[in-house]
Amino acid sequence: MNWQLSISSIPDLLQGAILTIELTAVAVSSGTIIGLLMAMCRLSKRKFLSVPSAVYVDFFRGTPLLVQLLLIGYGAPQVLNFQAPDNWFYIASIIALALNSGAYITEIFRAGIQSIDRGQSEAARSLGMSQTQSMLYVILPQAVKRVIPPLGNEFIAMLKDSSLVSVLAIQELLLSGKIIVGRTYQPFPVYIMVALIYLVMTFIISRFVNYTERRFAKNDIR
């Protein structure tokens, strides 16, 4: 194997990796906000809130992310009849990734909230708290601790799935590798380096999630 090519491709690949991390961080951060709001809607007894949120979750979890990227990237300007800006594909990538991540995070938050004993809410209400206050100050803080591991897994999954934005010509890690392969005609040494960079990133994130989970566990013991 041409190890010299693998090593010489690292600077270009790292630039793509930075964009991959940027896309993932923005998508999961936005998805967390969307997911929390949609989870509250799904748990609502009002059908005008619970039904649309259920449709949103079913659509974005039930269709491939690749199709969602193509629908938003190429279909939205046509359907909505607007002139796409020069950086539209980057914007479309963020929107598609955030909406997709938000659907999965919705279910993560919903499961976390439902895992809290109902007695906690009843105790808060008996102390004079409103339903909103009991949710904000009693239920959610406990639920957040429980959803940290699945949120970490979602970040790792999105980090890998972000490679699909290459179909919109976004030069993240995978497309950076494809460009080098197209120039050198040596796929194996380049793609093995791409795989190693993904492995390093996911390893670091998983260890950070484990560390955060242990810190929360220690605080609970205290």
Image (cartoon, helix red, strand yellow):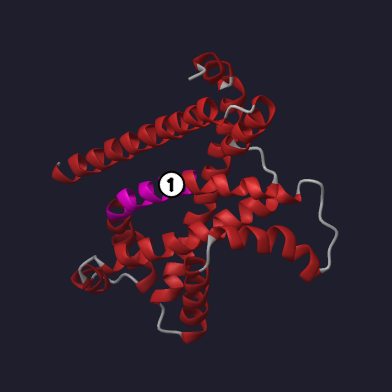
Q: Residue furthest bottom?
A: 47
Residue drawn at x 14%, y 44% is: 221
Quarter of the C terminus within the rendering: top left
- Which residues are drawn in magenta? 146-159
Q: How many marks?
A: 1
Left or right: 105 in relation to 98: left
Residue drawn at x 23%, y 74% is: 122
What crowding class fits label 1: few (fewer than 14 Cα within 10 Å), some (14-19), or many (20 or more)? many
Left or right: 158 in relation to 168: left
Quarter of the image for residue 68 reads: bottom right
Q: Looking at the magenta stretch, what is its main secondary structure?
A: helix
Q: Would residue 26 be seen by someone viewing this image from the given angle?
A: no
Please say if 144 is above or below 42: above
Quarter of the image for residue 121 reads: bottom left
Residue drawn at x 48%, y 49% is: 158
Disc 1, SS? helix
Residue 85: percent from the left, percent from the top?
82, 51
Q: Amino acid at mark 1?
A: Phe
Please say if 120 is above or below 1: below
Residue 40: percent from the left, percent from the top?
42, 70
Please say if 198 is above or below 4: below
Left or right: 129 in relation to 195: left
The foreground one among 85 and 35 is 85
The answer to whether residue 153 is magenta is yes
The residue at which mark 1 appears reads as: 155
Residue 118: percent from the left, percent from the top?
22, 72
The foreground one among 71 and 105 is 71
Please say if 25 is above or below 135: above
Residue drawn at x 20%, y 68% is: 117
